[in-house]
Every structure is written in structure tokens, then in C-alpha cells.
Amino acid sequence: MIARCPWPGDDPQMIEYHDDEWGVPVYDDQLLFAKLILDGAQAGLSWSTILHKRENYWRAFDNFDAEKIAGYDEKKFAELMNNAGIVRNRLKINAAIKNAQAYLKLQDEPGPFSDYLWGFVGGTAIENSWDSIELIPAQTPESEAMSKALKKRGFSFVGPTICYAFMQAVGMVNDHLVDCFRYNELKKI
């Protein structure tokens, strides 16, 4: 039997996400933008809820094309509010639009979005060594700094806990438990 972190449970989609994606370093700007929006959509919900709707999010939000999202009008907003395939929360949908606009402004600055975000961990993944899921923090000084900086730039639904979940998901921190088979695999990346 493969030793893995306990949080995926027995949900096949969560297991696949844990085994193939969670904690793998992401440097692609569009994927980072998409993951930031998806983690914001998770606020107050389980990641499983968002993961099971993720494909719907990609379709509903035009493959996370920030230029398209930034220009969404009332008609598109109403369409999203009526889309049962996503979380129909007015504040979260507004946040996605606002975040696309903030993302585009950040694109005007030198350097990619990836460099900006990875700068909060010094450009290299933080290697933790947790032996119990209860030891993993909900937020860190790095996620607090990221949250504060993103909010200052106009992003929303980017609190320190959301930012830490994002950092875990995109490999900025390796929070696989030390006895999980992915821990050492990702440590080598």
C-alpha cells in the first residue's frame, strides 16, 4: 500500500490531485492566475468541492483568460450566477473579475507574475518536514506577506490562509508529510 497524506481520503479525484498535482512547482503565469482564482473560490468550502467543479470553472471563466475575465459585463456575470457547475457566490465571482483586472495591471510591470509570486519564498520551494497533518500551519509569515501585497495591488479573496493553500498547491512549499511517497519525489524537483 502506498503511503500518502491522509487528506485525500478515498475520493479518487482527490487522490489523483494529491499524487499528480499538489505541491508540484508551477511557473506558468496563466496557471498560477487560475489556481489563485480557484483557491479564492474555495474560501469557506472544501478543496474537494472546487476540485470536482474545476473543469466547469475552466469553461465558465474562458480558460482563465485574464483579459476576457477583466472585461466581463453584467450579462456574463448573470450567466455565471446561473451556472450550477461553479460556486454561485456573488462576492467570489466579483473577486475573479477584480483579480483579473489586478493581474493585468501587474503584467504591465517588468517580470512575469510567476517571479512576483515566487519572490515571496525567495524563488525556491520551502521544504517542510511535517510528520503529522496537525502540525501543518494554516498560514505563515510568507503567506501573510503575499496576502498583504496582493490586496495592496487590488486582489481580493487572497487572505493569508487562501495564500498558504495556494502556495502549497503550486509547490512553493512542500507540505507533504515526510512518510508520504510524494515528499521525497518533490524534494528532488
Image (spheres, rainbow, N blue to C red):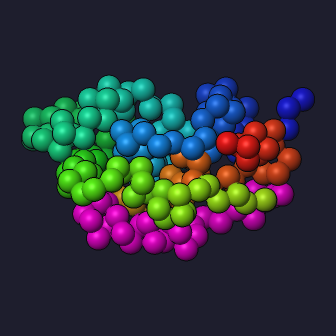
- Give the camera-side residue of 60 and 103: 103
Q: Give residue 3's position: percent from left, percent from top.
A: 85, 38
Left or right, 162 with reference to 29? right
146 lies above or below 64 = below
- The mark total stands at 0
157 lies above or below 74 = below
Residue 183 visible in the current orientation: yes
81 lies above or below 151 = above
Left or right, 35 with reference to 139? left
Q: Give residue 18's position: percent from left, percent from top.
A: 66, 37
Using the rendered view, name the quadrant where residue 117 is placed: bottom left
Question: In percent of the image, x 55 and y 74: which residue is there?
Answer: 141
- Give the camera-side residue of 14 and 116: 116
Question: In percent of the image, x 85 and y 32: which residue is there?
Answer: 2
Question: Image quadrant for the C terminus?
Answer: top right
Question: Image quadrant for the N terminus?
Answer: top right
Using the rendered view, name the quadrant where residue 165 is placed: bottom right
Q: Which residues are magenta?
A: 131-156
